[in-house]
Image (cartoon, grey):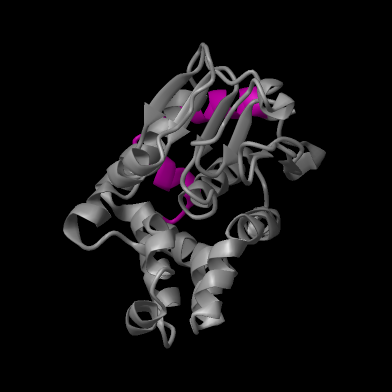
Amino acid sequence: MIAIPATTVANLRDLGDTPLSGGRTVRSGLVFRAGQLDRMDPAADPAVAALGLRTILDLRTDAERGDHPDRVPAGARLVVADALADKVSSTDAPAAAQLKHILADPVVAEEHLGGGKAQALFADTYRSLVSSNSARSAYRTLLTELTADDAGPLLFHCTAGKDRTGWAATVILTLLGADEATVEREYLSVNPAVRQAFAPLIEGFTAQGGDPEIALAIIGVVPEYLAAALEEVATKYGSMEKYVREGLGVPDEAVARLRERLIA
C-alpha cells in the first residue's frame, strides 16, 4: 500500500502495490483510502489532483457528514454509504463516529471507556461492521461501485480512515488474494498517520488528565479490533468469499470482475 503525501487529505493511501498470492500485486492508481475530505483541495494539492478521482464513497454517519461535508473534486461523483447507520439509530453513536467529542472530557471518557471498555466497544463496533444491515449495505455498495463497467479511480473514506475504512480495505485485499499477515500489516500501517493527524487532540486530552491508554485505544487500531471482525465473518459465514456472496449479496461474477480489474 502506498502512502500519498497529500497536504489537504489526511491518511491518504493507494491500495496499489500490496503483495498478493502468486507473486502478483494490487494495481495502483485505482483504489484509494483516506480520512475525511472536508479540506480536500485539488487546486492546491498536486498529489490529490494527480489521482483523477471519479468516485468518492463516504462511509460516515449523517452527523459526521453534516459537521464536515466532503469537498468533492470536479468531475467526481459522491456516493453515501453509511456503515454505522443501524448502530447509531439503536444506541449512542459509537466511538468510531465521535472521536473529538469523546476526548473533549477526560472524566466522561474514563467513565464510559476506562478499564478496557474502549477496547470492548471497538470490538463490538467491528463485529457490527460485518453483521449490521447498514454495514452490509455500505460494503455491498463499495464493491458494486468498484466492479462497475465504467468504474474509474475510487476513494473510500470515513472520519479518521482507520476503522470503517480499514474493514473496507481488509475485504478488498482479502478478495484479491492477500494473505492474513499482509492484510493485518496493511490494516495497522495507518497508525502513524492517524496519530499524527489527531496529535493535538491526544495532547489536549492527556494535558487535562485523560488516560493516554483511552486515547490510544480510540485513535489507533490494534490487531484485536480486526480479529473481532474476522471472527464474526468466520462464525457467521465461514469465509470472506461467503460473507461477500451471502452477507453482502455480491455475486461471484462481480468478484471475478474486481479481481480482473485490480490484480496486476
Instruction: Determine the residue located farthest toward the bottom in the rendered image.
Output: 115
Q: Is residue 23 magenta?
A: no
Occupied quadrant, residue 78: top left
Instruction: Determine the residue located farthest toward the right in the rendered image.
Output: 23
Q: Horizontal placement of 219 versus 183: left or right?
A: left
Residue 42 or residue 250, whichever sits in front = 42
Image spot of residue 33 (x, y percent) = 58, 39
Residue 96 or residue 264, whichever sits in front = 96
Q: Which residues are magenta?
A: 238-262
Residue 38 or residue 257, whichever sits in front = 38
Image spot of residue 1 (x, y percent) = 72, 43
- Residue at x-position 47% and y-position 52%: 239
Occupied quadrant, residue 216: bottom right
Image spot of residue 35 (x, y percent) = 54, 44
Image spot of residue 170 (x, y percent) = 56, 49
Reply above or below: 213 against 253. Answer: below
